[in-house]
Amino acid sequence: MNDTILGLLAFGLVLLTALSSLVLAYLRRKSGISLRIIPAYRNLRRAVGRVVEDGSRLHLSLGRGGLVTPQSASSLAGLALLRRLGNITSITDRPPIATCGESAVTLLAQSTLQRVAEEMHLAPDPSSARLTGLTPFSYAAGAIPAIRDENVSITMMMGNFGVEAALLLDACDRANVLSVAGSDHLTAQAVIYAGAGEPLIGEEVYAAGAYLESSPLQAASLVVQDGLRWLLIAILVGGVLLKVAGLL
Amino acid sequence: MKPKGLFSIIVASVFGLLVLTGYFIKLSLLVKISDLFLNWAILLAAFAVLLGIFNLLIVHMRKMASRQKGSGYSLLLVLAMLTTFVIGVIIPFYPKAAPALDFVFRAFQLPIEASLMAILTVTLVYSSIRLLGRRLNVFSIVFLLTVLLILLGTVSFPFLGTLPWLSDLIRPFVAQVLAGGGARGLLIGVALGSLVMGLRVLFGADHPYGGK
Amino acid sequence: MSQILCPNCNLPNPEGAESCLFCGSSLKPAEKAPDAPIRPGQQPTVKPTSELDKVKTPPITAGQTPVPRNTDELEQALPAWLRSLREQGELTGETGSTEEAVSSGGQPSASPSAQESEEPLDWLNRLSQEEEEIPDWIASLGGAETPAASGTSQPAKSAGPFEMPEMADSQAASSQPAEEEALPDWLGAFAQSPESSEDESAGLVSQDETASADILPDWLDRLTPQAQETPAPSEETETPDWLSGLSLGEEQAAPQAAPEPDWLFNQAAEPAEEKPESSSPAFTETPDWLAALEASAASESASEEQSVFREDLPVENAAPLEIPDWLTDFRVEEPKASAPAQAGEELAESLPDWLSGVQPTPSSSAGSVPALIGFEETSELTEQPAQEKADAFLLETPDWLERLGPEQTPEPVSPPAAESQGDESLQMAELPSWVQAMRPVESVISETGATVSESEGVVEQRGPLAGIRGVLPFLEIVPGRKPPAYSIKLQVTEQQQKYARLLEKLIQDEGQPKHIKPSVQYSIRIWRWIISVLLIVSALLPLVLGGFLSPDLTLFPSEWEQTHVLLDSFPENAAVLIVFDYGPAFFSELQVAAAPVVDRLLYRGARLALISTSPSGPALANQFLNSTQASHLQVGAQIVNLGYLPGGSSGVYYFASAPREAAPVAVDGSNPWESAVLSDVYQLSDFDALVVITENADTARAWVEQTQSHLGDTPVFLIVSAQAEPMVRPYYDSGQVDGLVTGLVGGKTYEQTFGTSGLARLYWDSLGMGVLAALLLILVGGAQMAILALREKKGGNA
């Protein structure tokens, strides 16, 4: 098939997704959209409340995904979650910290926490967001002391992780820290399922904004995402049938 | 919303839409513009590496200054970083220093990372053992059974060799069909989520580059 | 210091004072009041006693002994009615009625008794004989012998009729023979006998003007102008004789033959010991001399009870007073009672003429309390004869009082039984004028009965408003509805106590640490140690033992054949781009997997261009070559290291589109595109093969996807870790990737294929042993954890 046609089809799909999200967000802006319960986010709400109450610290690990790679989406989702949780937990005695395995994401994390501190009229801490390593295992090795030594009670792993996520989860298990982890990497998802307290599988990583912020556009985007999934299922099943039928 | 945040959203949205359009619609102007923006992004990413290294240095130096727990390790890290950096900088001017860099890499980084990999092996085995204690359900049992099947069908056991039926039939079927299919579905979902996430960033619903 | 007695309250005031310091009345001589009787509602005209000063003698001062005087001098001081009584008694010889002259300002209504004229009022003599504490107002009377004193001390002396309000309320107890010297002349006529019987009419003192003017107060002096001489004051006591006789009547009370006037008896049946429990409305406390009269009256017979006052007049707890002898002569019988009637007849015979016209007032009903204690109540009040109204003085009986009869008296409020029993013997006393002046208006109004309604006529008997008419009745507490008594003690029910105990126990339990039953805790660290030891032992054991424990592969992977064939199809001196995009951690695995392939390529004379999108890639590449290909590697001639390619997928895309621009400089700083290795390469498709070594499926996918459109027919080989093999196999299966080598197994496979012995063979036994150990650990540990979880679940449900 012509690349141009394929490109146009892809662009149309993207455009359709965008318009559907906007329209659905506008139509359901008052009634709201009911989402299925994800236990990880439900427990996260409670855990964040405990963090505020007992004065412990929230640790958010953003992984090693860059901003110019396909794994940037999970990094951006992690940054959005950092902003949301930073607004909640910055008022505690121990503000949240963020560890990253990629430089550009580290800079964005610093900017996010600095902006949160300014809005809360607090003094920004340059070391609140830190680059712990440039390689996956060095990044994991550098993030373990933050979990162990800085009075962390919750560790959220939201981004691009590999098998090194097992090291972080083991550190959380040793320190009796609640771990809520999610990655766009399949291997990491397997490791997270076995080792995390609250695993996030598949695209649940990208639903953090809708579950924690309850924005109409975010909830609508999740509905559109489900719609696209059904569309792809239909296309796949149709294609298989056509292939079997010899028409394709 | 503050004007500063609104300007950031506008710039991100405009540049993202241009690159997206140029990726799908092969118009010369759009392609050139998208390539230009991508080059800028690459430069920024490269420069961000230096900034990240600098940030790492600052964090550990502050840790040493405040004498926090683990400040000794921070000192080692800073020394190693500076040494490696200096060697790498003088190599073009002094090529005989190159083996030193190889030595540092070969003597420190490779063993440490390999050790971490070994620790990972123990951690993964331990996590597999505790899985049923942490989450006793059907999916955990299936997960463990799959792990055992893959392990049984992958290697040749001492004195036993490869196990028939497992190595040539069951394992390939489980790994390539079942696991592969599930993995493909997860990847599609991840891709859709990435698509929607990117659109939310373009529309300003998620702006990780600012506050409220 | 000379003092002025207040005509109203008779209290001494300093000389020169214009108004009384105690009651506020004017001390100036009042105008001569008309002779008209006082009307209801009217205040009696207060006249100073100086009007009575007919005897030009200075008043007695404190410390002076009153001089006995002839009571004849006080003839003029006597009220007209009293004089008329005397005259009538002298003329007609009729017995006097109830003498009201003792009451306050009452007009004398009793006709003088003839007997009285004949016999001097012994009671006056008795009064003078009694010695008792002299009130100040009496003592202040300078040189004037009071009628009472003279009457008491000199009973033989006869004195003109005069009004002695104080004396009228008390029962004369003057049984003592009064000293004749102390009695004034005007009282001496009355006090002829030292003892006077009770039957004697307790009338007024005879108008003996021989009483000493020095002893008499001013008002008495004015009454008796003929009395020029004041009798010498009694040397025994400063108290006027008539008054002292009253006070000492308790001791010298003598039985009286004649019936005593009712108005002089006030609860005569009561014993002398009875004391008034509560004072009358007019008086808050009984004067001593009055108390003496009560005591003397109490010792006398209490058979008759005649009230001087009206029945409605509240008299609380009136105690019997001693009636002086001179007063007993004027006793008026009770018309209603037979005995009092008989006594009244006898009394009428004995009353002087001037008292004969005085009718006894009806006795008060049960429960009525006389206004003043010790006063006898007149059973009936009669009108004052017109001729007796000589002077509108306080001693005249008011017309309203005369008109009142027993039938007009309203039902008085019944006091309590105890009081009622005591009130039976009390007589309604006649209040003197100054006492009546102090009475509340409501009570005065109620006496008239004209404007007072029946409800307002109720006189309060109890409480602080006792004696006052027209007040709201005292509400009785309904029997049986006792107001709830609230205890100050906390009332806690049994259930509340139970709850309180429970709460206390809960609070106590909070402070006490709970003993948690120790559960079997499996140490997590020991599992780590066990796993580590087993894996290390299993990995090292084959190395220690040597030899080959595990047989070679008999089954090759499906992609082996194609890969093998393709690798052998490369031309000699082929330009191969090798991408080292894996981390140092996977160096060992990928080194084993990639070594046979790279070795085969180098064996075939290929030119290798190394590049990496990972910062550590170039170093890893050098390390790989030095460790695996050192024997036949010629750096520079066959291999060029292009270094680090930034940008990830974008960088790959950029390199794929323009490799010379994306990687202009090699790691050693030279221009690789001018070297022998890449001199003929201008675009990506100029490479003969693309080999990507990575542990990350995304990296492999990116290289495959980004370079697909620029590679042309250049084959792509993927050397991946075992963890990435499921993700990249679809690319192989779809034909996007031409060759695939997966982990240590792939390396072993190609070593076996190429007939070489490398690291794969070395690691093959350790791999087998390690995997077997892990397998066993997962099986055993997993089963144990599952059993514990089930037990815990069952224990929780139980």
Image (cartoon, coloured by chain):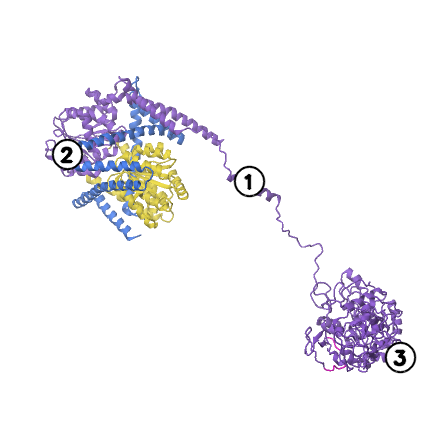
Chain colours: A yellow, B blue, C purple
Amino acid tagged 2: Pro
Q: Mark 3 touching mark 1, by CB under 8 A?
A: no
Q: Do labels 3 and 1 share a chain?
A: yes
Q: Nearer the viewer, mark 2 or mark 3?
A: 2
What chain letter is assigned to the residue under label 3? C
* Quarter that holds the N terminus of chain C: bottom right
Query: In the image, which disc is placed on residue B50?
Result: none
Q: Which of C394 and C689 is in front in this view?
A: C394
Amino acid tagged 1: Lys
Q: In this view, does C183 lie above or below A175?
A: below
Q: Is residue C258 left or right of residue B204?
A: right
| Residue pictured at 23% horizontal, 43% vertical | B20
- Find numbered disc 3 in the image and state the secondary structure of the residue it sits on: loop
As for residue B59 lying within the magenta part, the answer is no
- Find numbered disc 1 in the image and state the secondary structure of the residue it sits on: helix
Q: Is residue C4 left or right of residue A12?
A: right
Q: Position of residue C545 (x, y in %)?
A: 28, 17
Dominant secondary structure of the residues highlighted in magenta in the image: loop
* Residue A57 can be seen, yes or no: yes
| Residue under numbered circle 2 | B95
Q: Position of residue A243 (x, y in %)?
A: 26, 31
Bin the neighbour count of mark 2 within 10 Å (Cα to Cα): few under 14, some 14-19, many 20 and up.
few
Q: What stretch is highlighted in magenta?
A: C31-40
| Residue under numbered circle 1 | C505
Rendering quarter of residue B163: top left
| Residue under numbered circle 3 | C92
What chain letter is assigned to the residue under label 1? C
Give the CA separation, mark 2 to mark 1.
82 Å
Give the CA separation, mark 3 to mark 1.
104 Å
